[in-house]
Image (cartoon, rainbow, N blue to C red):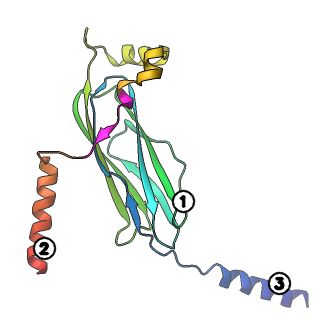
Amino acid sequence: MKRITIYISFLILLTACDKELKPAEVIIVDPVRHYYPVIQGEMLGVTYEIENISDNPLFIQEVQTSCGCLIPRDEMPITILPHKRGFVHIDYNTIKNTGYVEHYIYCYGNFKDTTIVELEFDTNVVPQADFIRDYEQLWQEQTKKTGSMRDIVDGTSSQKGYYTGELNPTPREQRREAVQDAIDDVAF
């Protein structure tokens, strides 16, 4: 009798675990962003909002970045329930960059029609005005930094936000549009 109960329990467990992960349809708020310039050595917090508009939960299994200076803050997997909003948080450490930078974040999950979603942002990293510091000096300044009343009221330069429109598309966007046009020509 005990063996039959164990056997039946085992069969129930096997059939109960037979769930298929269905794709989730999402809306990503501003997946391509252009941030205002930041001073070299500051941290720029980048947060992407993802809204799950389907009846299936979204599981983001992995977040990969195009550079080691981008640090994901979230523990994996990121779960966004049906008809809810979630976030992907990235910290961008500007210590090792100067000038124009463009970064990509790849989210792998059960997205509808694909398994990967690409997020991107760009900014200009501006060195300090008095002289160009080396990495050790920037690190020391960053660790000693304390907030002033002006930073609390106005925010630091890394908290000014971003914009999404651009008058002149980047070379990558131009290539992407050309490839899409070629696909559309073949499809129709």
Q: Which mark is residue 184?
A: 2
**Residue at figure coordinates x 67%, y 81% from the top left:** 16
Vertical comparison of 90 with 100: above or below: below
Residue pointed to by mark 3: 6
The answer to which quarter of the image holds residue 131 is top left
Q: Position of residue 91 (x, y in %)?
A: 43, 37
Would residue 11 be counted in the magenta stretch?
Answer: no
Give the SS element for disc 3. Answer: helix
Q: Secondary structure at mark 2?
A: helix
- Taking the image as shown, residue 162 lies to the left or right of residue 1, namely left
- Return the disc, 1 or 2, that comes first in the chain's sequence: 1
Would you say residue 25 is visible in this rendering? yes
Seen from this angle, which residue lies furthest top? 130
What stretch of residues is rendered in magenta?
Answer: 158-164
From the viewer's perspective, is residue 136 above or below residue 115?
above
What is the number of callouts on the image?
3
Between disc 2 and disc 3, the foreground one is: 2
Q: Which residue is mark 1?
A: 79
Dot 1 alpha-carbon crowd within 10 angstroms: few under 14, some 14 to 19, many 20 or more: some
Q: Are marks 3 and 1 in contact (CB under 8 Å)?
A: no
The type of residue carrying mark 2 is Asp
Circle 3 Cα neighbour tier, 10 Å, few/some/many (<14 / 14–19 / ≥20):
few
Distance (Cα) linking label 3 and label 1? 33 Å
Q: Callout 3, which amino acid?
A: Ile
Instruction: Please report the residue visible at 17 percent of the width from the left and 45 percent of the height from the top.
Output: 166
Measured Cα–Cα span from mark 2 to mark 3: 58 Å
Q: Is residue 163 magenta?
A: yes
Q: At which x and y percent is residue 133?
A: 30, 13
